[in-house]
Amino acid sequence: MIVFALALAAAPAFQDLATLDRVVAIALGADIGQPGGAVAPIDRRLKLAACPAAPVVEPGIAGSVSVRCAPLGWRVRVVTGGGSVAAASPGFSRVHAAPVVRRGDPVQMTVETDEFAISVEAIADQDGAPGDRIRVRTDDKGGPRMAQVVDAGRVTIAGYR
């Protein structure tokens, strides 16, 4: 019995992931599964050390935000359901713009560099306003790709300019 009690006392304290989900929902102004909110809850298989300070939600890349614990150095990426994130401060505000691309719409996906430009037809998997990063898919067997909405019916693959 004493060994069992010592094992419990020595067990590491893990971060409550439901609390992180609530922090993300408050920062984004939308609950899990709602437009502009997290697409899904944080994976419950994660075992993060309990953060001694308040976790910070920061804008991420490609339609996501990051939840970060500065004292311990861990960071979790949370995929969001579209929308734009402005400013990099705790409790940042959302920028709301009317979507010009709707889920299921055909879009022209382009990649442009100084040397070449390539365009292919794709289908939008998410709604998006200009500047938003959304998932799109082509007819090939590859998975969805992240693209930035340029205008109605037009998206571009970021990072090639």
Image (cartoon, rainbow, N blue to C red):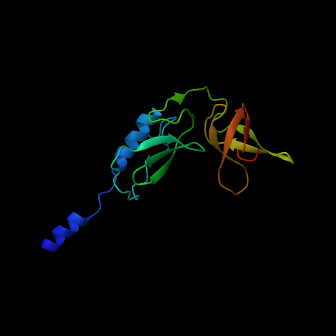
Corner quadrant of residue 7: bottom left
Residue 1 visible: no
Left or right of 61? Residue 25 is left
Quarter holding the N terminus is bottom left
Taking depth in this image into account, of 105 and 81 the one nearest to the observer is 81
Looking at the image, which residue sits at the far right? Answer: 115
Corner quadrant of residue 156: top right
Taking depth in this image into account, of 79 and 153 the one nearest to the observer is 79
Taking depth in this image into account, of 115 and 54 the one nearest to the observer is 54
Left or right of 46? Residue 66 is right
| Residue under the image location 71 percent in, 47 percent down | 159
| Residue under the image location 61 percent in, 35 percent down | 127
| Residue under the image location 68 percent in, 39 percent down | 148
The correct choice, above or below, for 44 with respect to 127 in the image is below
Q: Position of residue 49 (x, y in %)?
A: 36, 57
Q: Position of residue 130 (x, y in %)?
A: 67, 31
Corner quadrant of residue 2: bottom left
Left or right of 44? Residue 132 is right
Looking at the image, which residue sits at the far left? Answer: 1
